[in-house]
Image (spheres, rainbow, N blue to C red):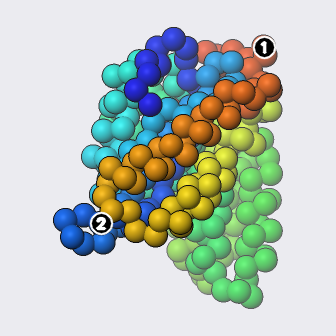
């Protein structure tokens, strides 16, 4: 957690958060546990940092990003996360020139929450069609067709497709055999489930420091497990990320 990071490059990073009940000044409040996982230029995954904060604000994410940079984080080309406003704002400030991949799983879930049970399967099938091409222009074209199809019945779905789909397509600039693992934070969601099992035993943490220590111990354990993996998480053989174009979309 406090180790220097400038001994290697981390072209990819995934970030996510979960909330825990913590006693603060005599009251039980919800606290965000922010987690950052990096992937080295050899394809190995590492636990980079975590912290407990009041919320997923631009300030709390910005503090984590600032600390990573102070420890020597370099070479970052793509950051994958959900579309939380605090994350996006902090990333635009601290990682200018880094592409952002909006988690496709979160994006699809948000759209499907906006439709009725009756329309659920058809909308889900339409999303599969939208994301099927490996061509950005074709994905956007299909997204517009889907938006037009559902606009009268679900204007919120059409709006989300038009405003958010392009942020889900950053992976199309990256190696094809990396895209499945880059397009979502599913790996981190599995990690969060491990944290949930640990925190469930406690219920309410007596303070931020105890939450940090207990969950931090679990994250260190995961980091050590990853260090023993024989195969890299990403196959980086013959991969030249320097040739990838920089496409930075303005923050919404």
Q: Nearer the viewer, residue 63 or 127?
A: 63
Q: Which residue occupies 46% across, 14% down? A: 6
Disc 2 on helix, strand or loop? strand
Residue 168 lies, with reference to residue 201, above or below; the image says above
User: How far is mark 1 from mark 2, CA to CA?
Assistant: 50 Å
How packed is label 1: few (under 14 Cα within 10 Å), some, or many (20 or more)?
few
Determine which quarter of the picture holds residue 173: top right
Determine which quarter of the picture holds residue 171: top right
On-image quarter of the N terminus: top left
Q: Position of residue 103 (x, y in %)?
A: 60, 51
Residue under label 2: 23
Q: Position of residue 8 (x, y in %)?
A: 55, 14
Q: Which residue occupies 19% across, 65% down? A: 25
Q: Position of residue 158 (x, y in %)?
A: 58, 69
For this view, does 56 lie left or right of residue 224? left
Disc 1 on helix, strand or loop? loop
How many marks are shown on the rendered structure?
Answer: 2
Residue 36 appears in the picture as rendered: yes
Residue under label 1: 238
Q: Which residue occupies 46% across, 69% down? A: 203
Residue 113 lies, with reference to residue 17, above or below; the image says below
How packed is label 2: few (under 14 Cα within 10 Å), some, or many (20 or more)?
some
In this view, which residue lies farthest toward the left?
A: 25
Q: Which residue occupies 54% across, 42% down? A: 219
Q: Nearer the viewer, residue 76 or 153?
A: 76
């Amino acid at each position: 957690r406090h180790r220097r990071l400038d001994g290697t490059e981390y072209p990819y990073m995934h970030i996510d958060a979960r909330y825990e009940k913590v006693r603060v000044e005599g009251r039980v409040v919800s606290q965000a546990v922010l987690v950052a996982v990096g992937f080295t230029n050899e394809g190995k995954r590492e636990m980079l940092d975590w912290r407990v904060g009041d919320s997923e604000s631009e300030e709390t994410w910005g503090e984590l990003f600032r600390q990573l940079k102070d420890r020597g984080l370099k070479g970052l080309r793509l950051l994958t996360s959900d579309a939380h406003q605090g994350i996006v704002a902090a990333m635009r400030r601290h990682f200018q020139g880094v592409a952002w991949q909006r988690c496709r799983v979160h994006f699809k879930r948000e759209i499907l929450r906006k439709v009725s049970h009756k329309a659920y399967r058809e909308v889900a099938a339409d999303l599969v069609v939208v994301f099927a091409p490996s061509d950005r222009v074709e994905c956007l074209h299909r997204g517009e067709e889907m938006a037009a199809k559902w606009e009268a019945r679900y204007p919120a779905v059409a709006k989300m497709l038009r405003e958010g789909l392009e942020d889900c397509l950053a992976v199309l600039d990256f190696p094809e055999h990396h895209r499945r693992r880059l397009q979502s934070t599913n790996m981190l969601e599995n990690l969060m489930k491990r944290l949930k099992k640990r925190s469930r035993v406690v219920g309410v943490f007596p303070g931020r420091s105890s939450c940090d220590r207990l969950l931090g111990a679990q994250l260190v354990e995961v980091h050590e497990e990853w260090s023993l993996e024989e195969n890299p998480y990403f196959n980086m053989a013959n991969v030249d990320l320097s040739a990838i174009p920089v496409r930075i979309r303005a923050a919404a």
